[in-house]
Image: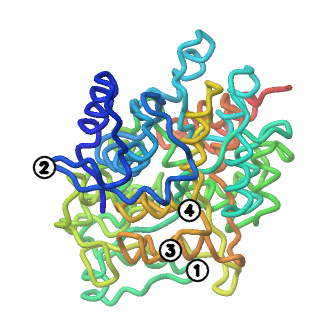
Amino acid sequence: MRLRGHRRLTAALVAAAALGLTLTACTGDIADEDNADVDCAPYDTYGTFEGKEVTVAGTILDLEADRLNESWADFEQCTGISVEYQGSSEFEAQIAVLAEGGNAPDVGIVPQPGLLARLATGGWLIPASQAVEDNVDEFWSEDWKKYGTFDDTFYAAPLMASIKGYVWYSPAEFEEKGYEIPKTLDELTTLSETIAAEGDHKPWCVGLESGEATGWPGTDWVEDFVLRQSGPDVYDQWVTHGIPFNDPQIAEAFDAVGGYLKNEDMVNGGIGDVSTQVTEAFQTAGLPILDGECSLHHQASFYETFWNPDGGDDVKVASDGDVFGFLLPPVNADDPLSVTGGGEFPVAFRDAEEVEAFRAYLSSDLWANNRVSLGGVISANKGVDPENASSELLTQSIEILQDPETTFRFDGSDLMPGAVGADSFWKGIVAWVGGEDTKQVLDTIESTWPTS
């Protein structure tokens, strides 16, 4: 049973300790009117740290932040560690500055391996404990472990995950109009052209606005096309600069995406003309599907949360519901399944037993199942039961990540150096959608790649 009101309970424990009383939070001896006792047996391995605090920061906000706090509520009560989370949309821009000034949180939930590498290079990160590494070796693939490693030092386990490249749509509209789920990229083009020709609305709705990170949803489009058109080897060469950013294979992907994002016939359904992609928030861009004002929206599995931003269930996400998603198809129908995705990595800035106990919990199958059961997210942790996911689509997503036959590649911009992946690539997308040609944009991005 999930604990609520755990901070009040922790305060009671501290007060009792001050009076010389002995209370054990995990034996069923403590309760208040707002919560039920927790079975602490699964948490025994993490130890007890009464009165200790771990501060955490990241980009996770609003409903997802609430769920994150709930995912470690039992851990807090059973270990005595108080976890204080602070979410900020400026986390990525500020964390290196905070670390340099000695003001970093104990744990930072980093969404980019490139940013992890930057923090490790600065000498600010604490290597992961053996307990964390043991969990990763048991529950995660070698690729995922590699994303939390820099210069042969393992710093962080993966946390949540996402599959990018879903195309969200209305099952009812598809049934009513006889649309088929496309099996190839050519069939996707044909479907888009069919919807455009009918004249009711533009087929695609797109939002690229995300504050200082405006443009990143467009990078996801390009990455999906590079992986599908040119394959994983070229993708790997691209993100590591084994081939230049302005390589013809990357230009091919940009031009294919441009057939949608730079085409007035294709976007921006229910929102405006092509230019509105840059001003429309990515969180709201898919919502015109619900009003029949567009038919297709390209966004990751985590977009499920944005259909019901208040945490309700008014919008049903299912193959027979209000919205559902299919994966951006391959070039050929019989091509192996290849997907891009993302994730987060809890890095440590303070060397302390309570910090590593907390990170060990986050790297476990226990935490992964707890969080997935709360809804809206997935994990690539092999110990996750897909049936714990909150929707048909998320169950499918977990199964895809757990399938050894799936070709998975981490989000390319997140793997690139920050000067490119979190700067010139994002800005390049904005300039490109705004009218700059592909060659000009790719040459500019290539010029920003660090020389060392």
Q: How far, Cα to Cα, is label 1 from label 4?
A: 35 Å
Lower sequence index among marks 1 and 4 = 1
Badge 2: few (under 14), some or many (20 or more) residues near its Cα, within 10 Å? Answer: few
User: Which comes sooner in the sequence, label 2 or label 4?
Assistant: 2
Question: 395 or 24, which lies in front?
Answer: 24
Q: Position of residue 160 (x, y in %)?
A: 52, 54
The span from disc 4 to disc 3 (Cα, nearest Å) is: 9 Å
- Which element carries disc 1, helix, strand or loop? loop
| Badge 3 element | loop
Circle 4 packing at 10 Å, graded few (<14), some (14-19), many (20+), is many
Amino acid type shown at disc 4: Asp
**Badge 2 is on which residue?**
33
Which residue, given by chain and number where applicable, does mark 3 sit on? 385
> Which is closer to the viewer, label 3 or label 2?
2
Which numbered circle lies on residue 168? Answer: none
Which one is in front, 119 or 104?
104
In 3D space, how far apart are the residues under numbered discs 3 and 2 (Cα atoms)?
32 Å
Report the residue marked by disc 4. Answer: 365
Amino acid type, callout 1: Thr
